[in-house]
Image (spheres, rainbow, N blue to C red):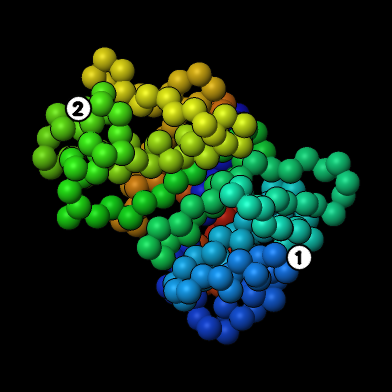
Amino acid sequence: MRSAFILLYDARQLADHDRDRFLACLGESELLRYRRFLRPLRQREFLLGRILLRFAVARLAGVALEAVHVAERKNQAPSVQLPLAGAALPFFSLSHSRGWVACAASVDTALGLDAEVLDAGRDVDAIGRAAFSEAESIWLSSRPGEDKAADFYAMWSSKEALFKLMSVQGNGSLSPEHVAAGTRLRSGPDWHARTWTQQGLVITLCSRERLQSVARICLQGAAPSAWTLQLDNRLS
């Protein structure tokens, strides 16, 4: 059974002493990028993303968190190395939105993740006309008013998640339609999308292979040992 999990964390709850402890885990290239962010919240999002990535990879690879090496790559997802040469790396994808950080991981299939805070006050029709294809914009304009904001974010996050998945597969320049015959698509050649709402977020996970199980865990505290217990309880 193909499965994945998504870790969620509110970076705004991170205490300064925990921030400093996590900073000590970062490598040189990560620290350089961290320091380039001007807003403290964006720094925390970046930091938590890299810590969640280490935690998820360590969990699936069966190694210590400290053994996972992460390095930045320009305009790409970070690279990850395990201590054993030739060891199979889990698939992963990261996202952040207004203080929330999300990390998806799987040993079964390539992933693309996007999480967006749902803001019902935005002019989603105008944004859709600017950002979506004609068919996608027409679909959005036809949606009932009470559902339109959620439908916009579902479409937006699906497109973002699919872009990440296709970038991992070397097809990032492609932009498949997400609407056909007036219906929003949730799968296509080599991609399958699932969308949820949780914690005020719209979350979409795209996978190359269809997933039978996706656990979503909102982590509490700042101790990876506590996260392990939370994940164990959710997956058991």
- Tell me the element at label 1: helix
Number of numbered tags placed on the structure image: 2
Q: Which residue is mark 1?
A: 66
Q: Residue furthest left?
A: 145
Dot 2 or dot 1: first in sequence order is 1
- Tell me the element at label 2: helix
Left or right, 189 with reference to 197: right
Quarter in which the N terminus is drawn:
top right
Q: Which residue is mark 2?
A: 138
Residue at the spot 82% in from the left edge and 43% down from the top edge: 87
Residue at the spot 70% in from the left edge and 50% down from the top edge: 79
Q: Of tags 2 and 1, which is closer to the observer?
A: 2
Residue 186 image offset from top left, x and y in percent: 39, 26
Q: Residue furthest top?
A: 181
Figure check: 145 above or below 83: above
> How packed is label 2: few (under 14 Cα within 10 Å), some, or many (20 or more)?
some
**Which residue occupies the foreground of this view, 208 or 216?**
208
Q: Quadrant of residue 149?
A: top left
